[in-house]
């Protein structure tokens, strides 16, 4: 199984980039992993929230393959503990999913069309985080899940 981490936005903030790269590299010890950042068009500046989400959705959906297992991060999604996330990821691997795609939407979240396409909707927290920090939290949690699956010492329950 491959893991793709996909998001709408700008390149990573230099202060956070190192951590994201480090955890992505660590995930790669367990599953091939890569980030794909979709940059919105500068011409979209000033669009209303709904119109912007529709434009972003089109960019997202053209990058998602039919057989990708899409995990949309959304505040209304299901909350999982780190241990439950590990079990959930292991279940996807057992199902022979070819590519597991974790998706972070833009500043206003994800359009309904993307949420309908998602195979699973996950909430990291009821708290609101800066977009760049969500990338770091996501990669750290996926890495933590990998270590839990392998019963390694990183996670202290």
Image (spheres, rainbow, N blue to C red):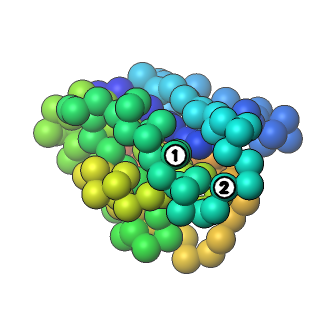
Residue identifier under label 2: 47
Q: Residue shown at 54%/71% (left/top)?
A: 125
Q: Nearer the viewer, residue 90 or 137?
A: 137
Residue identifier under label 1: 55
**Dot 2 alpha-carbon crowd within 10 angstroms: few under 14, some 14 to 19, many 20 or more:** few
Q: Residue shown at 37%/52% (left/top)?
A: 114
How many numbered callouts?
2
Please indicate whether residue 128 sits to the left or right of residue 61 in the image. Answer: right
Whether residue 48 is visible here, answered yes or no, is yes
Report x, y in % for residue 31: 39, 27
Q: Residue shown at 27%/34% (left/top)?
A: 68
Residue 73's place in the image compared with 30, above or below, is below
Label 1 element class = helix
Label 2 element class = loop
Report x, y in % for residue 59: 48, 36
**Sequence-first disc among 1 and 2:** 2
Quarter of the rendering containing residue 48: bottom right
Residue 98's place in the image compared with 128, above or below, is above
Q: Residue furthest bottom?
A: 126
| Marks 1 and 2, how far apart at CA | 10 Å
Q: Residue furthest left?
A: 95
Quadrant, the N terminus: top left
Please indicate whether residue 21 sits to the left or right of residue 87 in the image. Answer: right
**Dot 1 alpha-carbon crowd within 10 angstroms: few under 14, some 14 to 19, many 20 or more:** some
Q: Nearer the viewer, residue 59 or 94?
A: 59
Quarter of the rendering containing residue 96: top left
> Do the numbered discs 1 and 2 sit on residues whose CB atoms are within 8 Å?
yes
Report x, y in % for residue 63: 40, 30
Report x, y in % for residue 139: 56, 43
Q: Nearer the viewer, residue 37 or 24?
A: 37
Residue 53's place in the image compared with 81, above or below, is above
Whether residue 3 is visible here, answered yes or no, is no
């Amino acid at each position: 199984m491959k893991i793709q981490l996909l998001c709408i936005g700008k390149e990573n903030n230099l202060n956070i980039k190192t951590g994201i790269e480090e955890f992505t590299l660590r995930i790669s010890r367990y599953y091939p992993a890569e980030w794909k950042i979709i940059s919105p068009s500068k011409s979209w500046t000033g669009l209303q929230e709904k119109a912007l989400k529709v434009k972003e959705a089109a960019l997202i959906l053209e990058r998602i393959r039919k057989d990708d297992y899409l995990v949309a991060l959304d505040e209304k999604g299901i909350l999982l503990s780190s241990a439950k996330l590990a079990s959930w990821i292991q279940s996807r691997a057992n199902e022979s999913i070819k590519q597991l795609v974790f998706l972070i939407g833009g500043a206003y979240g994800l359009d309904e069309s993307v949420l309908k396409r998602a195979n699973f909707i996950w909430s990291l927290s009821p708290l609101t985080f800066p977009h760049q920090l969500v990338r770091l939290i996501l990669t750290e949690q996926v890495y933590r899940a990998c270590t839990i699956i392998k019963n390694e010492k990183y996670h202290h329950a």
